Image (spheres, helix red, strand yellow):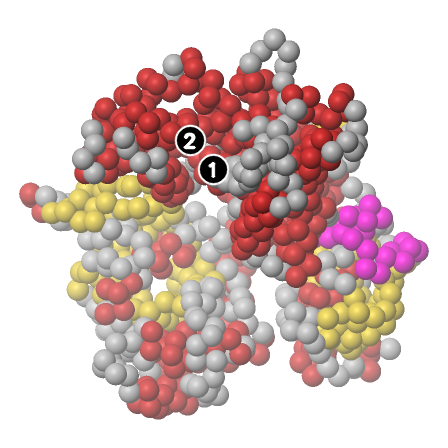
Amino acid sequence: MAEDLLERPGPSPTSIPKVEMRGIVKRFPGVVANDGVDFTIYAGEIHALLGENGAGKTTLMNILYGIYTPDAGVIRVRGVPVRLRSPRDAIRLGIGMVHQDFRLIEAHTVVENVFLNYDGLGFIPKWSALESRLEEIASNYGWRLDPRARVGDLSPGEKQQVELLKLLVRGADILLLDEPTSVLTPIETKMLFKTMRRMAEEGKSIVLITHKLSEAMSVSDRVTLMRRGKIVLSKPTKEATIEELSTAMVGAQLIGDAGLEERQSAPADGAPTLQLSALSVMGDEGVLAVKDADLTVYRGEIVGVAGVSGNGQTELVEAIAGLRKPVRGRIILNGADVTGASPRRLMELGLTYIPPEGKKWGIVPELSIYENVALRVARYAPYSRLGVINWRKVAEVAEKVVSEFRVDTASIKSRAGSLSGGNVQRLILGRELTTSKPSLLVAAYPTKGLDIAASEQVRRILSKLRSEGVGVLMLSEDLDEILELSDRIVVMYGGRIVGVVGRGEATPELLGVMMSRGVAASASA
Amino acid sequence: MLRRSLPGGLKLLVRVERRPEVTPRYSIIVSLGMLLLAFLASGLIFQLLGFSALHIYRSFFTALLSPIMLEEVFRRSAPIILASIGLCYSYRMGFWNIGAEGQLYMGMIAATGVVVLHSAGYGTGQHLLLPTVIAASMVAGGAWGLVPVILKVRFGANEIITTLMLNYTAILLADFLVHGAWKDPAGYGFAQTVQFPSTARISIPGVSDAVAYLVLAMAVTVLTLLVFKFTVFGFESKIVGLNIYASRYAGVGISSILVRGVFISGALAGLAGLIVVSGLIGRLRPGASPGYGYHAIIASMLGGLYPPAVFFSSILFGMLVTGGDLLQASLQMPKSGVEIIMAMIFLATIVAEFVKRHRLTIVVRGRGVVA
């Protein structure tokens, strides 16, 4: 079936495909990341490559970029069969890739970073020539980028432009962008899409690797969907529907759940569990990141914190979790003043914190799953007595966590680092919720980077906690998620809480205005 | 990456890849293999220097395994075992303590101080002398280790540098005392202190010193293994070493774990110092330790921070230290010959770490497949 879909012509029906990948197979120990994949890229198109984490998208693109060599299959670029031994080969053929994590030297300027990848400057570099070339490219796409600026001082969106410059200056016309919007604000994302459009108009081909359906729908000409190493669908975007794509993406798993309907009911009239008064927190740069924040979270409600990233949300929750000492103000947890208390004391008083970047903060990847469960409980009876750990008890609770929270693993002795992002998040949530009875759950970006099914499960867990009378404070970059789950929405801008909007009044437009301008809308009363 | 063309258009590719999982068995095999390579490489150097490597190794090991020499090997191994087991506590927390030598010297100084006072008529009676010197040496070694911890926690000072510098401080302090205030008045002007009385020596009635030390070292090794495996402290110290973010998040008291771990580390080095000064040479004098604290660093690395393995790798270093004197006496080879072997083992340990984590994959590819 996939075969005849691929025979379908691209945007310019007569052209030879720019890239044709046929029957690509790539195996890693224990998995087949690409299993006979056919993929075609035409000139002048934005081609969205969709799939959940681990579907094989990035592997396929790494093969096209020469990072991996396929175990089988043929690659043709502009009709000619090629062998890509390294990115160098790919670059020579006009293929360029922007990785999810930037590969830039922060201490160097834009022009110096570009120079590192460019050998058209001669032995003694003619900086001015390169600078003016960069300025020319930047203005072509409407970027305001100073070639002499230090990369460390640039915003994520600008860093991405530098990555694109590195490719464009070498004349790349097949651009592979791996999850390019994951670090961008909504405005920067819009800007990037505009750039991509312009590039396509110039005849360049762009592959947008993403797991966000809405992105694929809004910007691409064609969409190809991968699941478990295989192509399951490939068609012009205008013939595809969101429903069709999301069903194809998760396969047989159902999306949506009756349990979420209960959430529509009014919140339980609980007692306050968390009270912040005039809380100010210092950021990493020595500037106040949170300014005079007042907030109360009641038991049995979900409070969503919305805001463009970098407006103090992370520092706010880190202060609540005891990982950052506030400079002013007070934090009251269940009636006790816990300003400046240690994470351990907060935990013992009923706070559970779900950190961002689970693999960095929440688990120790080198250790087994049961040791990661011990991480949180080893100090307490019955898991230890007089400082001696009872590993049998730990293993028992670990088994419980794994089965109740559906952590997909062969055994609790497996390394936690081998789990996928969704499983890590389920492990963290499961560990925290199985081993403690929180009155307040603070979750920082709990669904970030998770696939649809895993996100849905996390959301379900949060609303279940809410109905059990737990107060939930949640950060999310996904406005839809905040709107869907929250009873009240707090908007942060420039370190201040600029408004609190109730469930009924919140609309994406209203929140969007508050997030981007910091104007406390009249509805916030 | 390495490429070889084979007949028939086939290509042979050799790649270095990260290993997904390192099993303990594989890890031990690699360590032993690299150890063998270290001896082979040292042998090659001996050969190039005009000695017969085979002869050296044969007489080296036959002599060392003779009952008399074996006893000396065990005596010399004891301080290395204690110090290297101690270092395991530091290293598993990611605290790169290379100050075991200084901590060992502080242990020697403190124990000697008690004995000097005792001989001058101050302090405890004979029966309390041993517990006092043990406590003094361990507390002094531990406290010396805490200085870099405080500097790190308070000011972010790099412990590799501070621990190394404090080694020289301790060694020079010992020199200063031995040449000055603590010089034995009846010592014919030699820079050395009074002899340790037999009541200040660790011993087990009815067995030789070597056996007593070995029993002590074994007990410390087993106890450490149990601490690492079964205690909250052992577990949390591992977490601190592996992921400082997760430790903070999980509410591990990082500073308190560091303080406890490094104190134990220094205290065991201090205890090693007591054995040197009370048992091996009987008094404090300049250069009392030939670098036991440094040998311990390599021994703990070679043993992969696993106490039983560290125990045996320390005995290997005990053999090398003892064998150095042997080389000089019977083979007319400079004592520093063994330092070549030690350096080779050190290099091999570093290479072994890389080898353990990577593997070579060999792929044969035909011409038909475009890759």
Q: Secondary structure at mark 1?
A: loop
Report whether A383 appears left or right of B30.
right
Q: Is residue B58 above or below residue B237?
A: above
Q: Is residue A198 above or below residue B7?
A: below
Report whether A350 appears left or right of B363.
right
Image quadrant occupied by the C terminus of chain A: bottom right
In this view of the protein, which residue sits in the foreground, A409 or B234? B234
Question: Can you identify the residue that label 1 sits on?
Answer: B290
Q: Secondary structure at mark 2?
A: helix
Which segment did they paint magenta? A333-356
Name the chain under label 1: B
| Tag of residue B321 | 2
Residue B138 in the image, given as x and y percentages of width and height: 67, 35
- Decide if residue A89 is in sight here: yes
Whether labels 1 and 2 belong to a single chain: the reply is yes
Q: Is residue B11 magenta?
A: no
- What is the C-alpha distance between the residues marked 1 and 2? 8 Å
Q: Residue furthest left?
A: B7
The quarter of the picture where residue A313 lies is: bottom right
